Every structure is written in structure tokens, then in C-alpha cells.
Amino acid sequence: MATLTVWKFDTAGGAQNALTLLERMQKEELLQVNDGAYVTWPEGKKKPKTQQMHSLAGAGALGGSFWGFLFGLIFFVPLLGMAVGAAVGAMSASMADVGIDDDFIRGVREHVTPGTSALFVLTSNVVVDKVAQEFKDTGATLLQTNLSAEQEARVREAFSDAE
């Protein structure tokens, strides 16, 4: 089973700085990074900058279409207005089927604001207590949703054709 984890940092550069920590933990076999991306949102900017992690992503990476869609739902749909929001509503309902529901999206949207950053990581084989302690030491806040094996397979199926 994979876990989609979101670590929120109180600085715009915190998520990018945590990539070294994530790489070290993967080398120590405390977790396996299947895919990931991060968001940096400098103070004074209207929207965040997003970046997919290529160096740590495993062979089963979801790809840019997944991250683009997820970040669009979280950060950009509210800016585009109700007409576009309604059109995307049907597509976002399918995300709920894979464990990424409105509460998750709303929670991330409320926490990741100008002046902050977030690290989004799809992981498996996690040594939870050790990984949690490592991130706690950075001052990060954890938001998380688990994906069952079936939900992970649905996400992969939905986004495999888009690449």
C-alpha cells in the first residue's frame, strides 16, 4: 500500500531543503519514494511554483499529469472561478474514489499559503516512527492520506495514458 504524504513547511524553501533528508532516508531504507513533487510559495506571489521530483522517483512514478491535476485542484481551480470549477468538479469526484477527497484538498489549500512550501510524496515501505521523527525535527506539519492497493492502482490507471 502506498501513502500520499504532504509535509508543510513554514518557509518557502523548506520543502526543497527537505529533499536531501528524503534522499538520505531512502538510502537508509527508512522509506521507498515512488514519486513526489514539491510546492514553493514565496511571500507576495499570487500562486505557488510546483516542481516534480525526478531524481528520487521510482520506476512506478505517476508522472507529471497526476501532479499537475492534483496541484490544479488544490491551488489553481479556486483562482479560475466557478465556471471552470464546476467543469473540474466531476473530475475531482473521481479523485475521491482514490483517497484524495475534498477534505484532503481543502486541508492542503488551507495550510499551504504564501510564505510556505510543501513536499508531496508517494511512498511505500515506510518505517513510520523514524520518518516522522526526522520530519518533526524540521518543524514540518504533516497532512496525510493513505491509498489502498486498489486506490493506488486506480490512480496509476487513470494517469498512465496521459503521459
Image (cartoon, rainbow, N blue to C red):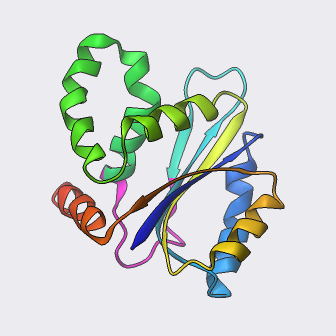
Q: How far from the left and from the top, in percent, is residue 2? A: 42, 70
Above or below residue 137? Residue 79 is above
In the rendered view, would you say 53 is above or below 67? below
Q: Is residue 140 left or right of residue 105?
A: right
Up/down of 65 relative to 114, above or below: below
Direction bottom: furthest residue: 28
Magenta residues, as a range? 52-65
Q: Nearer the viewer, residue 148 or 117?
A: 148
Q: Quadrant of the C terminus?
A: bottom left
Residue displayed at 38% across by 35% down: 102
Image quadrant where residue 155 sits: bottom left
Q: Residue at x 58, y 29 (%)?
A: 110
Query: Is residue 86 rendered magenta in the image?
Result: no
Q: Residue at x 64, y 29 (%)?
A: 113
> What residue occupies the far left of the structure in this picture?
161
In this orientation, which residue lies closer to the viewer: 82 or 143? 143
Image coordinates of residue 41 in percent, x first then y, are 64, 34
Q: Is residue 55 magenta?
A: yes
Q: Residue 57: give x, y in percent of width and height.
A: 47, 71
Mostly what secondary structure, the magenta segment? Answer: loop
Where the N terminus falls, by quadrant? Answer: bottom left
